[in-house]
Amino acid sequence: MRKIIFVPVCVLVLFLAEFFLFNMAGRWFMPNLLLLAIIYFNLAFGIRYSIFTAVLAGVLKDSFSAGVFGINIFSFVLCAYLTTVLKRYLHYVASRRSRLLLVFLITVINILVHFFFQAMFTKIDVVQILKFVFIPEVLTTLIAASFIFAELKKCVSKLFV
């Protein structure tokens, strides 16, 4: 029961953190904290909580975005499933490198899914996407991954011990 309450609270806090980071630092420091939560809950609790987190995060992000509704939900759920598949082959429990490699691959997949669906509905410039979305989001998400995973691990250990 605690996990079911903890997941929406965590999603809401990380969504607000993304919002404040975007307003304070601009587009150049915009880690995808909700994607990190999905990956963490998949590694810590399994696919069920990861899908639950993905749907909540996707609905919340789609509700406040100006784009097509459902893109974030689809991409987050797809990333949750792919995290399950990739963690079998790439993730070693004590290895920080394997976690960062997993975060890198899932972030790239998330951006590519967004790129694909945006290209279906609007005209986009590939150079602008690489310059202002791909590189900043991947780098800042990788930088924030270790910190977010450590903080989520502390919260989970205090809540469930």
Image (cartoon, helix red, strand yellow):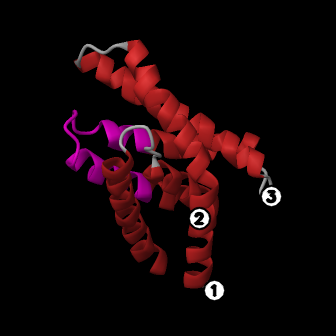
| Identity, as a three-letter code, of the amino acid under mark 2 | Phe
The spot of residue 84 in percent (x, y) is: 61, 47
Q: Which residues are magenta?
A: 52-76
Q: From the image, tell me which residue sits under label 1.
A: 161
Q: Nearer the viewer, mark 2 or mark 1?
A: 1
Give the answer, above or below, for where 33 lies relative to 5: above
What residue is rendered at 54% in x and 36% in y? 138
The spot of residue 160 in percent (x, y) is: 58, 82
| Identity, as a three-letter code, of the amino acid under mark 3 | Ala
Q: CA distance from mark 1 to mark 3?
A: 20 Å
**Mark 2 or mark 1: which comes first in sequence?**
2
Please give the count of numbered marks on the rendered protein: 3
Secondary structure at badge 1 equals loop
- In the image: residue 109, left or right of residue 127: right
Indicate whether residue 65 is drawn in magenta. yes
- Of residues 52 and 112, the one drawn nearer to the viewer in this rendering: 112
Dot 3 alpha-carbon crowd within 10 angstroms: few under 14, some 14 to 19, many 20 or more: few
Q: From the image, tell me which residue sits under label 3.
A: 94
Indicate whether residue 36 is drawn in magenta. no
What residue is rendered at 29% in x and 49% in y? 61
Q: From the image, tell me which residue sits under label 2.
A: 45
Q: Quadrant of the C terminus?
A: bottom right
What residue is rendered at 55% in x and 76% in y? 155
